[in-house]
Amino acid sequence: MSLFAQTLKQMEDASNLLGLTNDAQRILEYPERILQVSIPVRMDNGEIKVFEGYRVQHSTIRGPAKGGVRFSPQVDIDEVKALAAWMSIKCAVVNIPLGGGKGGVAVNTRDLSNRELERLSRGYIRAIAPIVGPKKDVPAPDMYTNPQIMAWFADEFSMLQGHNTLGVVTGKPIEVGGSAGRGAATAQGGVYVLDKYIKETKGNPKTAIVQGFGNAGYHVARMLHEKGIKVIAVSDSTGGIFDEKGIDPYAVHTSKVAHGSVQDLPNVKKIRNDDLLALPCDVLFLAAKENEIHKDNARSVQAKIIVELANGPITPEGDKILAQAGTVVIPDILANAGGVTVSYFELIQNEMNFYWSEEEVQERLKVIMEKALDEVLDTQRRCYSYSELDNTGEYIKHAKQPDMCHRITLRQSAFIRALQRIETSMKLRGKI
Ligand code: GLU
C-alpha cells in the first residue's frame, strides 16, 4: 500500500467511527494543490544537474498550509502527499490555526558540496515562490534539511519580494528570525505528552529505547537521560548500540559528530536495527523514518509504550498488531506536533517582530501539548469502537452493543478530534 493510501485509510477508519460526512472525507482525499518543479543546479565541476522537487498543499481550510521540506533520495509525490495530509491532521490535533503542506527534493545531500546545497536550496524556493508566503504556505525543516537551509530559503524569498519576509519559513537560525526552543521542539513536545500520559495513567517508566539519532532522536535521548530514565539502546541508519546499564546520549552525540555513526561509541554492544525494536523496555521512541514497524516485526515489539516522533513509523497492519497486544502508541500526529507548534510560535514572533525567551516558548508549548493529550484521552474514554479485531488484525463490525466494543486507539482518537475540527471549519465556511 502506498504511503498516501495508508494515510487515507487512517482517515477513513476514523471517519467511520466518527460518522463524518462523506463530503468532508471526499475533500480531504485530494490535496488542494500540487506543484512539481525542476531545479537545475550548476555543480562545482561546471555541469548542470537537474533535481526534481515538489510542494503539496493538502488543506488550507484552517489556515495557511504548514509543513517541512525534506531532501532525500526516496522523495516522491506519493510520500509528499501523505506527509502533507498528516500535517493538516497534526495542526488540527493540537488546534493551531494552520493547514497542512509538505515539500521535498529527491537528492542525497551527502553527494553535494555546501555550495551546491546552497544553490539547490535557493533554486527550490525560487521554483515554489509563487505559491508560498507567510499567509499562504510556510515551509520548515524535515529530514535532511536544517536551519541553514531555512536561512537560505528566507533570504532568497526576501530578495524576490524586495523586502525581508522572514516568516516565509520557520525553523530558521535564531539570528535570522528563528524561535528559541525550535531545535529541540519536536522532542520536547513528545516528552511533555509522555509525561502527562504517565501522570494520567500513574505509570513509572524506568527504561527507554530511541530509534533514530537525528535532531529529534538526540534531543529526546538527552531529555530522558536528564529526567533519570535510563536510555538502554539507540540507533541510526547504520545500526544500534545497547547497554543495559544505560547509555550517555551526550557521549553518543559527540562520537557520532566526530565519526559519523552511533556505533562508533566504544565499549557498548552493537546490535541490528530489528533487534533494537525487539528489546524489552518501558518506552520506545521511534525517531527514524516511515514504516519501521510493520506486520513482520510488530509481534516482536516488547515496549509497553511507543512514542512516534517520526512521521508514519508504524504501518496500519503493524498498528493493529500492536493494538491487539495492548501496546500503547502515542501517535505521530500528537507526539511530534511540538515541532510545528513552535514553528507556529516562530511565525507569530516574525509577524510581531518581537521575540520570546526559551522559557516562554516552553511554557506555551507545554500548555498546548498537554491540552491536546487531554482531549485525545477524553475522546478515547467516551468513544468506543463498535468493532473488534479478529486474529488477523482486521476489524469486524458489530451491531451497536457496548459489550462488543473495544476501546479505540489513541491514533483513532487523535484523528477523530482533528477531523471534527476540520469538518466544522468546512461547514462554517460553507464548503460542505
Ligand atoms: N517537519 C516537521 C513535521 O513533520 C515540522 C513542520 C513545521 O514545523 O512546519 O511536523
Image (spheres, helix red, strand yellow):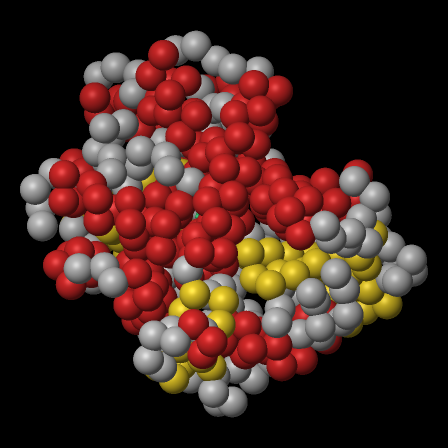
Asked if residue 143 can be seen in this view, the reply is: no
Image quarter where ligand 1 lies: top left
Q: Is residue 318 left or right of residue 247?
A: left
Answer with the quarter of the image where residue 280 lies.
bottom right
Residue 83 location (% of width, % of height): 36, 56
Residue 343 location (% of width, % of height): 43, 32
Residue 166 location (% of width, % of height): 35, 22
Residue at (30, 36) in percent of width and height: 98
> 388 or 31, which lies in front?
388
- Quadrant location of the N terminus? bottom left
Residue at (87, 62) in percent of width and height: 243
Answer with the quarter of the image where residue 121 lies.
top left
Asked if residue 330 can be seen in this view, the reply is: yes
Residue at (58, 24) in percent of width and height: 363
> 399 or 363, which lies in front?
399
Q: Residue furthest bottom?
A: 391
Residue 370 location (% of width, % of height): 55, 38
- How many numbered marks have been drawn onto this rendered protein structure? 0
Q: Is residue 14 left or right of residue 268?
A: left
> 96 or 162, which lies in front?
96
> Is residue 78 placed above or below 405 in the rendered structure?
above
